[in-house]
Image (cartoon, grey):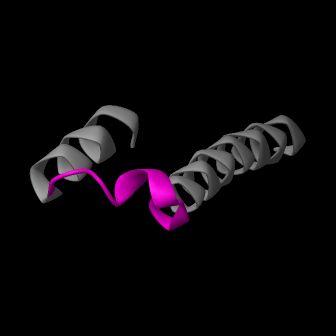
Amino acid sequence: MQASRSNQGMFWSQARELFEQIVSWLDSNSICRLEHSQIESKLLENG
């Protein structure tokens, strides 16, 4: 069971890191010039 918990922790930490990157990107000024559809496309591509 210990290995299973370790793998889950690694999975969730990677997922959290990706989530934080997406939130940071959404909070940046770089998306201000993008159309709504472009933002959605990027989210689908990266998220």
Residue at the extreme left of the image, as rendered: 37
Query: Where is residue 36 drawn, in percent x and y?
Result: 15, 58
Query: Where is residue 13 drawn, in percent x and y?
Result: 74, 48
Q: Residue at x 68, y 41 (%)?
A: 14
Q: Nearer the viewer, residue 19 or 1?
A: 19
Q: Quadrant of the N terminus?
A: top right
Q: Is residue 14 left or right of residue 19?
A: right
Q: Residue at x 15, y 53 (%)?
A: 35
Q: Nearer the viewer, residue 12 or 33?
A: 33
Q: Is residue 7 left or right of residue 21?
A: right
Q: Residue at x 63, y 57 (%)?
A: 20
User: How many numbered tags mark residues here?
Assistant: 0
Q: Residue at x 45, y 51 (%)?
A: 30
Q: Is residue 25 left or right of residue 3?
A: left
Q: Nearer the viewer, residue 5 or 11?
A: 11
Q: Is residue 47 left or right of residue 45?
A: right
Q: Is residue 21 magenta?
A: no
The magenta span reads 26-35
